Amino acid sequence: MSVITEAPKDAPLGKGGMFNWAWLQWFQSVHLTASTTQESGPTTQRPTKNLWIGRRFFDTTVGKPVYLKSTAPNVWVDGAGTVS
């Protein structure tokens, strides 16, 4: 998954008042990013899809937020960089 970091430069609405494809992709990326900031659960429920380096998850088993350090394999670390 690629995270879109900048809004498209062209007008958001195309012909007929419909959002153009670049803007739809941008809105989906913003929505995904915003919704993941509130995710929490036990270690066994850490995300396995829509991953990116730095993704946050509050792990209720260890009682702290963890961040994705690498993928393939997925490595989660706490704020001090300790594998959690």
Image (cartoon, rainbow, N blue to C red):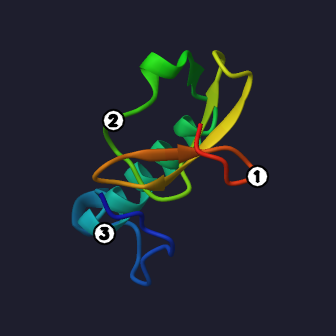
In the depicted view, which residue is nearer to us: 8 or 46?
A: 46
Amino acid type at image mark 3: Ala
Q: CA distance from mark 1 to mark 3?
A: 37 Å
Up-down: is 73 above or below 62? below
In the depicted view, which residue is nearer to us: 17 or 35?
A: 35
Amino acid type at image mark 2: Thr
Quadrant the N terminus occupies: bottom left
Image coordinates for residue 31, horizontal then vertical, percent: 49, 45
Image coordinates for residue 61, horizontal then vertical, percent: 63, 15
Image coordinates for residue 57, horizontal then vertical, percent: 59, 35
Q: Quadrant of residue 58?
A: top right
Image coordinates for residue 3, horizontal then vertical, percent: 41, 63
Q: Is 71 left or right of 68, judged from the image as shown?
A: left
Closer to us: mark 1 or mark 2?
Answer: 1
Q: Is 15 left or right of 24, judged from the image as shown?
A: left
- Give yes or no for contact between labels 3 and 2 (Cβ–Cβ under 8 Å): no
Q: Which residue is mark 3?
A: 22
Q: Quadrant of residue 50?
A: top left
Q: Residue at x 38, y 46 (%)?
A: 74
Q: Which residue is mark 2?
A: 48
Q: Residue at x 45, y 47 (%)?
A: 75
Q: Quadrant of residue 84?
A: top right
Q: Secondary structure at mark 3?
A: helix
Residue 80, numbered circle = 1
Up-down: is 54 above or below 34? below
Up-down: is 15 above or below 66? below
Q: Secondary structure at mark 2?
A: loop
Q: CA distance from mark 3 to mark 2?
A: 26 Å
Residue extending farthest to the front is 82
Q: Secondary structure at mark 1?
A: loop
- Give yes or no for contact between labels 1 and 2 (Cβ–Cβ under 8 Å): no
